[in-house]
Image (cartoon, helix red, strand yellow):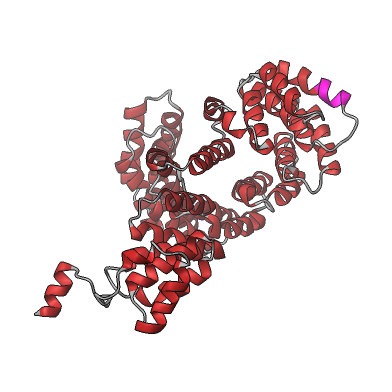
Amino acid sequence: ECSLLTEFFNQDTTLRIPDSISIDTLFQEPLIEEKILMLKEEIGGYYALDSILAGILLKEGRIEEAFKVIIPYLEYKNAVAYCRTVRARKYYQDGDYESAANDIILSQTKEPELLLMLADALTVLGENPLFLYDDISATAEDTLIIAKVRKNLMVWNFMHGDYDEVVKQGMEFARDDTSLIRLYLYSLARTGKKATADSLFCQFFNAVDYRLLNYYGEFLIEQKRYSTARVYYDSIIDSLQETAAAELYFNWALVPFLEGEIDTAYERFISFMSQFKDDEKYYRAAFKIATIKYLKQEFDSAVYYYKIAAEDDSLCLDALQNQLICYKKAGDWKKVIESGNELIPFLTEEEEAGDYFEIGYAYLRSGKLRNAIDYLKRAAELDPSPEFHYWLGEAYLAKGDFIRSLYQYQKIIELYPRDEMWTPTAHYKKGIVLEFMDEVDEAKKVYRAIIKKRGRDDTWGIEAQKRLEALE
């Protein structure tokens, strides 16, 4: 009963320090750490002493030592919250951001320093920390913490393309940090305030900043002011004395691409790839060249460049999907199947249906009916669209399985009566299947129904009339 009561009331489960020891007097004497260590040798370990010692060590930045002091108390419910805050600091120092974030959250601390640490950890983990910054700003009294919050906010907003927010923050708190000043100036240029950015830039820096020039160009592109952007980039490229500004050259090629002048864009992207093989935009240039090749129906060349683009993780999925489309346009069904299978690991369950369909359709065109039926059936199960059911019906028909083929066509007619592409086609094919089954009278009924519903002048009405006359 005592154990249950202790658990219920969450009473102190660590040893109580003897009444003869006054904790308050420790803080009135110099050399607190030495006094606590002497007491520990005399009376043993007590949470009241060790938590004070851990706090002293933390203030001195001796996180590892503080953690060792506090380890024995992690098992006690009344001590675990504080112990987690100490352990979180150690995890953070060691680069284990997930464990640090977990401990800070579970400790339920409101300490601004730890909440800032949590925000940093979440940022590294790719999570949004913005909700924490409001709490920190509202409770923090330390001006250094407030300044760190504002700096973090500037970096976060800039990295996520929220340039207006960066401009709203201003640059007063960033005047001692040239990297933050640059972010502010870049944001001014990126929001169209180039004159202001140029004026401030001259106050802090001397050398030309190509990124600043490019951010204004990207503003023009975002505003679809392509003619102005083209003149702007042409003038910059003409004046460049070096070829170090990769982003400028990339956008110099991008503008004519967006204007539809693909031959000019192609030459410039090819030039970009030859000059900037180590730049992050190398793969994006390859993707653009592949798109140009696709538009020109040069599918083999398009595939070559899509393969290069697929080496970039951010482009991989789109590049592989477009590569499959190129093979399909070229009628290379074997490659369609290979590309489709290569895609599967990158797709969600919702996306898999389309990929299964492409593989199944390629198998059907290759005459491999059993494989075609297998993949087309999977596609129709994941996404019961009329197109998927229709081609599954076609695969069954090619295999001579008339009952299953008829079932697929009938399903389209019943489930998608308003579809103007697949439903009339399925209705007509239903009549063809009935003919194959020697159900001539039933086939005639189908053709008459098509003529009645769509009229004799309709494409399908004309085809139905032809079949009806042939049967009669």
Horizontal relation, residue 241 to residue 188: left or right? right
Horizontal relation, residue 422 to residue 307: left or right? left
Horizontal relation, residue 458 to residue 411: left or right? right
Q: Classify residue 461 by image quadrant.
A: top left
Q: Give the residue at x 68% y 33%.
A: 182
Which quarter of the figure is the N terminus placed in? bottom left
Q: Give the residue at x 83% y 20%.
A: 235
Picture layout, residue 165 above or below residue 122? above
Q: What is the x, y in percent for residue 10?
A: 19, 68
Picture layout, residue 48 above or below residue 167? below
Q: What is the x, y in percent for residue 165?
A: 52, 29
Q: Is residue 374 visible?
A: no
Which range is magenta? Answer: 234-239
Pick out the residue farthest to the front.
Answer: 29
Which residue is nearer to you in this view: 391 or 448?
391
Labels in figure, total:
0
Q: Name the dominant secondary structure of the magenta segment.
A: helix
Horizontal relation, residue 373 to residue 472: left or right? right
Picture layout, residue 47 above or below residue 338? below
Which quarter of the figure is the C terminus placed in? top left
Q: What is the x, y in percent for residue 247?
A: 75, 35
Q: Classify residue 279 by image quadrant.
A: top right
Q: Classify residue 454 by image quadrant.
A: top left
Q: Give the residue at x 61% y 48%.
A: 314
Which residue is nearer to you in this view: 59 or 71?
59
Pick out the residue farthest to the right.
Answer: 241
Which residue is nearer to you in this view: 15 or 302?
15
Does the stretch in magenta take in 196? Answer: no
Q: Is residue 290 visible?
A: yes
Q: What is the x, y in percent for residue 398?
A: 50, 56
